[in-house]
Amino acid sequence: MYSKKNLLTLYLTVGYPDKDTFFKSLDIMVKEGMDILELGIPVENPSLDGNTISNTHKVSLEKGFNEKVLDIYLKKIKSLYPNLPILIMSYKDGIEKYNLLDKTNLYDAILAPDESLQLDNVKTVQIFNEKMNKEQIKDKLSITNCFAYVMSGVGTTGTKGDLPQGYIQTMKNIREISDIPIQIGFGIYSDNQIKEVLSRGANGVIIGSEIIRKVDEGLDSLRKYMKNISKARE
């Protein structure tokens, strides 16, 4: 799966904005071409995320999100979409608080932006950017066994504007060491940006904040957006 071309990895925060809307949004995303679900697990301080995604963490936590709730969601997602790869995205605090490493039978891979995970029982994803030297990249690649998550440029998620170009150098640095699949995230939201990134040789794109914005606008808006980005990667 991860080595395929033109992949869409899309983000939702579990339980946001409520259970009914979450599953209706997920259903639209699956039916309209999502390849991999990046499932955000709420924490108090999602330091790498901008306001859009940080707010979803706050909303889910205020509604009583806990480990028991997480188990219910993970089991239902697996039941509804048994062939959908699930990439868990959480911080060190969330991994510990919700015992995520004891639930590896309910997801396919895990990403922690503030911790370099090295695990035997589940695939791991690490984040790379243009400020990392080749030794740092090599070290992270040695514990990455799913795909390399390359930041379009250093910063937080959710920025809208011209796509940073730092990812081009990062991809080049990784390719000098490994042929691991690469996906580009951070600040990607438009059709043209998707086409540009894929034309550079990335295996896929990761979109988070814009998905949340469309969920906030309503299911029709999300459906329309999904159709557009699915077409853009063809």
Image (spheres, rainbow, N blue to C red):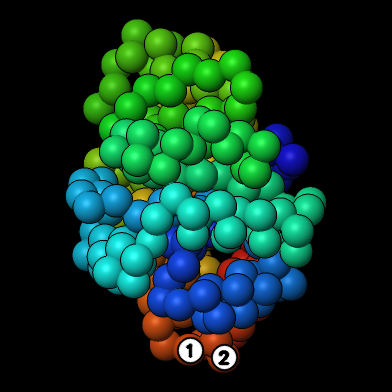
Q: Is residue 64 visible?
A: yes
Looking at the image, residue 63 sits to the left or right of residue 70; the answer is left
Q: Nearer the viewer, residue 214 or 41?
A: 41
| Residue 197 drawn at (x, y percent) | 51, 50
Q: Which mark is residue 220?
A: 2
Q: Residues within 10 Å of mark 1 (few under 14, many from 20)?
A: few
| Residue 72 drawn at (x, y percent) | 58, 59
Looking at the image, residue 183 sits to the left or right of residue 50; the answer is right
The residue under the point 48% across, 22% down is 174
The residue under the point 33% across, 14% down is 136
- Quarter of the view holding residue 227: bottom right
- Quarter of the view holding residue 50: bottom left
Contact between marks 2 and 1 (CB within 8 A): the answer is yes
Q: Residues within 10 Å of mark 2 (few under 14, many from 20)?
A: few
Residue 165, relative to residue 34: is it above or below?
A: above
Q: Residue furthest front?
A: 68
Q: Which residue is mark 1?
A: 218
Identify residue type, mark 2.
Answer: Asp
